[in-house]
Amino acid sequence: MALFKKRTVGKPGEWYYCLRHQKVEEGPECRAADRLGPYGSKEEAAHAIEIAQERNAEWETDPRWQKDRGEESEA
């Protein structure tokens, strides 16, 4: 008996962006390593790459992150 079962059907309203196929999918059609999400809507999932880029830019310019990086490099 398997401990973890692969879901073959996603939940309605659960949207992902598949990096491998470059398309929006309802429910997890592809493996987790190849997708971003879940998102609340199909339109939001369609902009997953832009959302990720915006979040990365915020993270890279976050002063708290820069402080942590400086402390690590001094050690």
Image (tube, rainbow, N blue to C red):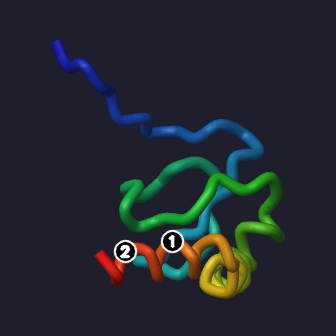
- Residue 26 left/right relative to 42: left
Q: Which residue is mark 2?
A: 72
x then y, percent, for residue 14? 69, 47
Please report the residue visible at 34 percent of the width from the left and 82 percent of the height from the top. Answer: 74
Q: Is residue 39 above or below residue 20?
A: above
Q: Quadrant of the C terminus?
A: bottom left
Q: Which residue is mark 1?
A: 68
Q: Secondary structure at mark 2?
A: helix
Please report the residue visible at 41 percent of the width from the left and 55 percent of the height from the top. Answer: 32
Q: Is residue 70 above or below residue 32?
A: below
Relative to the observer, which residue lies in front, 60 or 11? 60
Three-letter amino acid code at disc 1? Asp
Determine which quarter of the picture holds residue 24.
bottom right
Please report the residue visible at 80 percent of the width from the left and 68 percent of the height from the top. Answer: 44
Q: Residues within 10 Å of mark 1 (few under 14, many from 20)?
A: few
Q: Residues within 10 Å of mark 2 (few under 14, many from 20)?
A: few
- Residue 32 left/right relative to 37: left
Relative to the observer, which residue lies in front, 59 or 44? 59
x then y, percent, for residue 18? 51, 70
Three-letter amino acid code at disc 2? Glu
Q: Is residue 9 above or below residue 23?
A: above
- Residue 21 left/right relative to 10: left
Relative to the observer, which residue lies in front, 57 or 23? 57
Determine which quarter of the picture holds residue 65.
bottom right
Relative to the observer, which residue lies in front, 53 or 21? 53
Q: Residue furthest front?
A: 74
Tell me, yes or no, whether the two marked residues, 1 and 2, touch with CB atoms within 8 Å.
yes
Please report the residue visible at 61 percent of the width from the left and 58 percent of the height from the top. Answer: 37
